[in-house]
Amino acid sequence: MMYAHRTFRNVLLVASFVFIVVLAPFAEGAEKTLTVGVALDVTQGTLSSRSAFILTDRNGKKLSVPRSVVFSVPKPGTILVGKTSLALPVNISGKSPLTFEKTAYRGSLRLTQNKSGVNVINVIGVEGYLRGVLKMEVNPQWPFETLKAQAIIARTYALKHVGRHRDQGFDLCATQHCQVYRGVNAEDPRSDKAISVTKGMVLTYRGELALTPYHSDSGGVTADVSSVWGGSHEYLQAREEPFASGSPYASWESSFSERELADAIRSLGVNVGSIISLIPENKDPRGRVPRLLVEGTTGKASVSTHQLRMALGPTVLRSTVFEISASPRGNDVPSATSTFPAPTPASPPTGSDTNRSLTSGEDLVIALTQEGAFSTEELMDMLLHPEKRQDYVQKALSRSKRPSLPVVPVPEAPAMPGKTFHFKGRGWGHGVGLSQWGAKSMADRGWTCTQILDHYYPGTSTKKVY
């Protein structure tokens, strides 16, 4: 999420998405302790702290460490610290934040067995966890009511997804699959204050924790969840923005060659030959296009625009609010994975979709991650070894065993001259739930945190659960 872009099954692997999450039991009481997997299946690593800390193994054996220590995994079930062997699981505690590699964490750490290595797990209270999340989701210099709204959303998300990685021995991972978490490294005074003043506050709907997806910029109107991932939630319907967002992504242009579009559509399990036309289906009054009718030389098919956006790349087809035109090759503007230059953002981009100020390769990793293309082990390996990202992306794309969408056969037609398809659009992100630039615009005009959340999640209630 790093300056927000969210937010879960692979759109590149399925033809339709059902919006389902693992629901944790909702109960009020004391602040909950979370277990967060911050590194998976590592075979060695460095632990450190500003003061002495203690490692305690499964048998109660203790090892005091003055400042820093390197551990290795000589065989399953044990770690080796210097000449001392400790039986897993190993709990690590100290008076100061504990650092694994270069990231510091509040609470304690735990090492548990995983295949040939160990999982590094941060055991921490919800509020401390949020301190390592919020700055990754929203610019801390934005209006304070926006930060408060984001804190409530992030808290609700964490509590809703407790136990999501239970089979791996922890509640949440530290990647986009859950919420990007960077421990003490991501803390900021303004974000911390927003967390503090909203302590224990969540969004509920009919007594249950609400689903709180969000994105960078809606382009003027949010999307109904059913048109993006499937499923139905009364509080996740299309909502018009009351004000212009002021987003640097308010308008954008991208162009794709016929071949690029055909390749992307084939990756969704649809082969209609050379692309003749793209026609928006069920376009809403504000320009959002849930589906496209694709006509090719060998057939026609209906394709989810959200899936096509993920296949083309969410940093080049930024949203599903657009107009399409085509020109014969020869009248092309620069096509394909290049977009027209985007406006320089006045502040870092935000949102839970895939909207980060990162390289295009990392943007694709983020997009695939959000849609479930990688296993948790692969995600953590990419975090530890960035040089492996391209290999994992290629593997994810090659695993495309997507059910084919219905294709209507048509008589074989001669190949058409190559075309370039031009998209002119608005906004950035999947469009469901809160638009962060929209929320900023509301707060700039005096809207409160509660008013912002009421607008984007109508019918929900803000409730303090501890």
Image: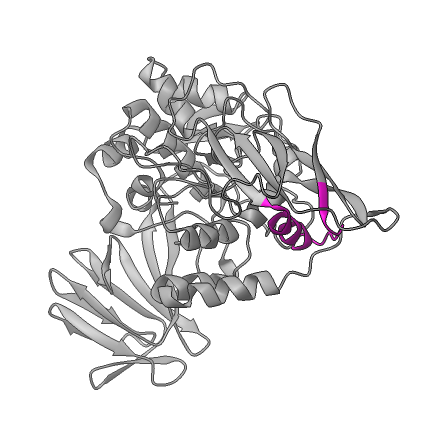
Q: Is residue 35 above or below residue 223?
A: below
Tell whether position 269 is magenta. Answer: yes
Q: Residue furthest right?
A: 411
| Residue 229 percent across, percent down from the top left | 62, 40
Q: Nearer the viewer, residue 330 or 190?
A: 330
Query: Is 90 displayed left or right of 26 in the figure?
Result: left
Q: In the rendered image, which quarter contains the C terminus?
A: top left
Q: Is residue 189 above or below residue 14?
A: above
Query: Is residue 377 in view from this perspective?
Result: no
Query: Is residue 142 in view from this perspective?
Result: yes
Q: Residue furthest front?
A: 330
Q: Quadrant of residue 348?
A: top left
Query: Is 244 displayed left or right of 61 in the figure?
Result: right
| Residue 365 percent across, percent down from the top left | 46, 55
Query: Is 16 displayed left or right of 165 in the figure?
Result: right
Q: Is residue 47 above or below residue 320?
A: below
Q: Which residues are magenta?
A: 257-276
Q: Quadrant of residue 48?
A: bottom left
Q: Residue at x 22, y 75 (%)?
A: 70
Q: In the rendered image, which quarter contains the N terminus?
A: top left
Tell whether position 432 is magenta. Answer: no
Q: Is residue 353 above or below residue 175?
A: above
| Residue 236 percent across, percent down from the top left | 57, 28
| Residue 445 percent across, percent down from the top left | 34, 13
